[in-house]
Amino acid sequence: MLTNFRRLQTVLLIFSILLATSPSRADFTFIHTTDTHIGAGDNVNLDAAMYRELRTLAPRPAFIVNTGDVTESGLEREFAAYKKVRDENLGTEIPVYDTPGNHDARWNPLGKEGFTRGLGEPLWRSWDRENVHFVALDSTVLLQHWGHFDQEELDWLAKDLAKNGRERPVVLGFHHFFLRDTRGGPQQVDNYAALLKVIAPYNVRLFLIGHGHSDIQWSINGIPAIMAKGLYQGSYHQIAVTGETMRVQRRTVASESAPQTVLTIPLDQQTAAAPSWRAQVRLSGSEGTVTVEPGKLPAQTTFAFSAGGNVTPLTRGPDGGYRGTFKTDRWMAGSYTGLVSATLPTAVAGLTPIYARAIPLTVVTAPGGKNTPIWTRVLPSAIQSRLVRAGGLVYVPTMGGSLYALDSATGRTRWQFKTGGALFSVPLVDSGTVYVGSGDHFIYALDAITGKLRWKRETGGSVLAGAARAGEVVCIASTDRKIYGLEAATGTVRWTQGVESLYQSAAITDGTRFYLGGWDNKFRCLDARTGTPIWTNTFGRSFYYSPAIGSPTLGDGRVFVTSNDGLLHAMDAVTGRVLWETKPMNLGYSGPLLQGGTLYNASLTGGGIVRAFDAATGTQKWETPTGSVIYDSSCVASGGTVFVGCVNGTFSALRQSDGALLWQYQLGPGHLLASPAADDERVYIANMDGTVAAFSAVAP
């Protein structure tokens, strides 16, 4: 009897351990909303009505995931209004997990810090509910429209998923979409392949995505992705989770019908396993060849190769493999990403599974005498700001918080200085000192040769703007809505001047006055010694069109600045009197470059047009399309050549005299938002994947 009793005790103990360690399998429901855009139109009332509907759902949702564009402009009052609308109409019983969208980060007066302050929520995080692991990510780029996952975030995600394990189902939510289209064109998220590499070993079962304002679903490497219209447009997803499936229902007010089931997703990891197949791409002369070994994929699987928006279907050969050829005769030299896609014949979870593999390609030579880099470096962080060349060094600020000083001839690191926040601020090199602001709220002064800290000064906000120095005063703006005048030698605050919004561009000086523009529609001239306003001009019909992004320039007694409504303004530097303005021509977000009596300015639209203007009259001299969209990248000139970068990675060289396109180079998959630097020998450029490259500045 005693033996039987002990056996029973052992069985009960094992059973209790299994109960304690087995994941909970209780059913629950959660909601996916997106793009609330509080601050635009009548969205306060429209979103309020939708929240009241969500509050009455049965069963009550366990929580809501809101995938970005919480606000229209990222203003503090908009975040406060969002919380008020949400809490008053939804109640406090249903938690909401918000992710940032481009509208929350692009114009935010505090940068990304405005999101965390405004909502009291982190930029990324994870949580568990019953048998499912949820992750909310930040896909935004500081002060930009585009998408990117920072390396720090990807490192965190890798650790988070490793702790979660390979079997538990995972749901990922973020704002920007990618691989909606596998034709090889530009993606909203430039480093989506890095994200897919991190999540590949794990049981990711669903992507929750916003940004596109569409009620759609698609497959990202066999994983369902869902997008909804904005909540104010009357759309959301209701997702019921059981032990075996997730059932996705879409509610669209416009349909005036009950929610419709659009996907039923099995949670078993076995169904999430990526198929095993191999792809290879070879370039030879003006042609490329793609070959695919399909492995165990069904015979009805179709394959295609795409790059630059062109699709090449692959045909099956007698050996069971697939093959196709494509032309590269119009490709410029540089780095490309091709996509080999496999479309499976059988639907899974209500979707046709499509698997896309990014294949890096390099064109070493191309027709027409295109240029190639003298050297390249890949830094471990995104680069978004202007590079600066001085004293044999190229200074590169990174979004990972480090300022690198690279040898201009070789690209080797001379020194690296780490701050506690992102470096969006354009470094100023003056009299042997580098002045730069950081997202950690500090302004730093470093020895230009050694990188050693000379002083640092704390402000009340992120320092995203660039500095200027007049005599012993350094002028730089902070997101605490102050412009600072600091002692150049010590960092002691000599004066401050209040402003009304974010200032992100670099200040300039004529030695006695500072000039700078911001998102309050103001272009200001301040006395360098006292900070006293001398004159102020107002540009732009709303804050969206402020003279805020492109840094101004000076010369011949005039100061020039672009406003975001596409105008170039010329003012008397002493009085502020407007001397001339261009007609609206979408000059975009680049700052003007003045050289030899001519202004050079890049355009957002029209194929990324670069224009030249007479600085005295504003008369246009020439215009040349680069063929790609230009965002924040501004022109630099050397050796009779103008250089500028395009968002898709194209780096262009144009002849100064007539705008003739001399050569182009494809820098790689990262968004190119930085502005180049140049000296008499070389020009330097960088992009969001951390690549820094040097080219000859001598015209071919």
Image (spheres, rainbow, N blue to C red):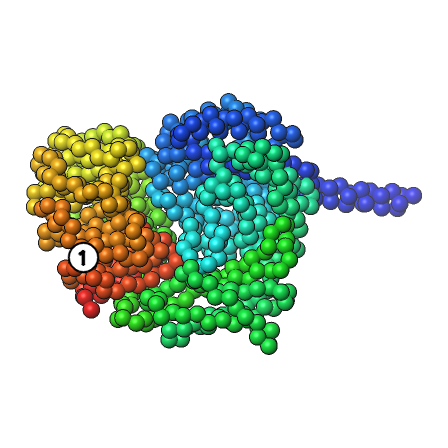
What amino acid is labelled 1 in the image?
Answer: Ala
Above or below for 527 versus 468 = above
Residue 339 in the image: x percent, y percent?
47, 62
Furthest residue toward right: 1
Residue at the spot x=42%, y=50% of the render? 188
Q: What quarter of the picture does the C terminus occupy?
A: bottom left
Between 421 and 215, the residue placed more toward the observer is 215
Q: How many marks?
A: 1
Furthest residue toward top: 88
Residue at the spot x=19%, y=35% of the render? 523
Above or below for 662 versus 528 = below
Q: Is residue 339 visible?
A: yes
Residue 468 in the image: x percent, y percent?
18, 43
| Residue 26 image-quadrant placement | top right
On the image, numbered disc 1 is attached to which residue? 637
Residue at the spot x=30%, y=45% of the render? 424
Callout 1: few (<14), some (14-19), or many (20+) C-alpha neighbours within 10 Å?
A: many
Horizontal relation, residue 111 to residue 696: left or right: right
